[in-house]
Amino acid sequence: MASHVETVRVAPPADLLKGQTALVTGANSGIGKGTALALGRAGADVVVNYVSDREAAEQVVDEITSYGVRAVACEADVSQESQVAAMIDRTVREFGTLDILVANAGMQRDAKVTDMTLAQWQKVLDVNLTGQFLCAREAVKEFRRRGVVPEVSRAAGKIICMSSVHQLIPWAGHVNYATSKGGVQMMMQTLAQELAPEKIRVNAVAPGAIRTPINRSAWETASAREDLLRLIPYDRIGDPEDIAHAVVLLASDLMDYVVGTTLYVDGGMTLFPGFATGG
Ligand code: BGC
């Protein structure tokens, strides 16, 4: 079985998001980092949010600025209302406005239900769900203040929520995480419905198994990889770029009529691969 084979790399057009400012939460590592880099490559200026590990965030900033666009690192805990408001303020101060929010920051604190503490439950809901709500709410205020600028984009603003295949697939031992992503789905759809008349587009990307620090134990050893690949019809583990490119497209006017959709980027994980031979 093929594992991870380096192959031809593709990249978004360098002027696709030219003149737009994007904010990516949790952009110092994993999917957030890959997304921040891809948005920069597509011509956007980027705010690289992090909550800890300033050095990693600064490295992402350096790489993005090497593409000839602007970037800043911005510390904020997305679950804290005042920090989120300060982050949006800073974005507007530095870059004039905000065009694209990628509500990406997320975490896992796994435990079987009777071992799960209230703190583990609460923390994951606070960051993964409340954090996306707070960032979306503050971004919408800025989108509304500025409105549509036709030379920049047909929309008044774009929000891309980072969900997961686990907004659909129940996940034993991860009730806090799966519940948070189920919540992200309904939050995204409700905001999309509420905000579409103002030309604010809200969508989500639902990644499957992407090779990042959050799921290291699922791909690090050969036997874990084998188990994981059994769940992925396309027979490879995803890379952050796979998600990043979906986000860049959803943020662009190429997808201007896409409103309230979840784009699953999962190598077919949500196709119930067990039924390829069973049932
Ligand atoms: C989780 C990963 C997991 C993947 C597929 C993601 O949302 O964060 O840990 O590997 O879903 O199950």
Image (cartoon, rainbow, N blue to C red):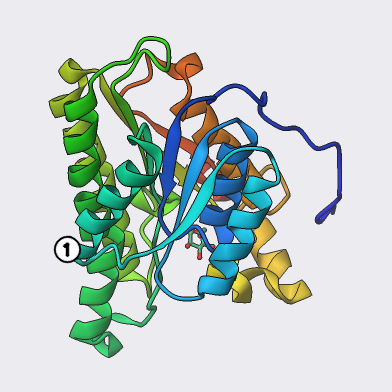
- Work out whether 126 lies above or below 85: below
User: Hey, which quadrant is residue 204 in on the image?
Assistant: top left
> Residue 202 appears at what percent x and percent y?
30, 31
Residue drawn at the location 38% of the way across and 70% of the way down? 172
The residue under label 1 is which amino acid type?
Ser
Residue drawn at the location 33% of the way across and 65% of the way down? 76
Residue drawn at the location 23% of the way across and 87% of the way down? 117
Asked if disc 1 is less than 8 Å from ligand 1, the answer is: no
Q: Could you tell whether 144 is left or right of 49 in the image?
A: left
Q: Nearer the viewer, residue 186 or 243?
A: 243
Residue drawn at the location 50% of the way across and 36% of the way down? 247
Q: How many marks?
A: 1
> Residue 130 appears at what percent x and percent y?
20, 59
Q: Could you tell whether 226 is left or right of 135 in the image?
A: right
Residue extending farthest left: 194
Quadrant holding the N terminus:
bottom right
- Work out whether 121 lies above or below 36: below
The residue carrying pointer 1 sits among few (fewer than 14), some (14 to 19) or many (20 or more) residues within 10 Å by Cα, namely few
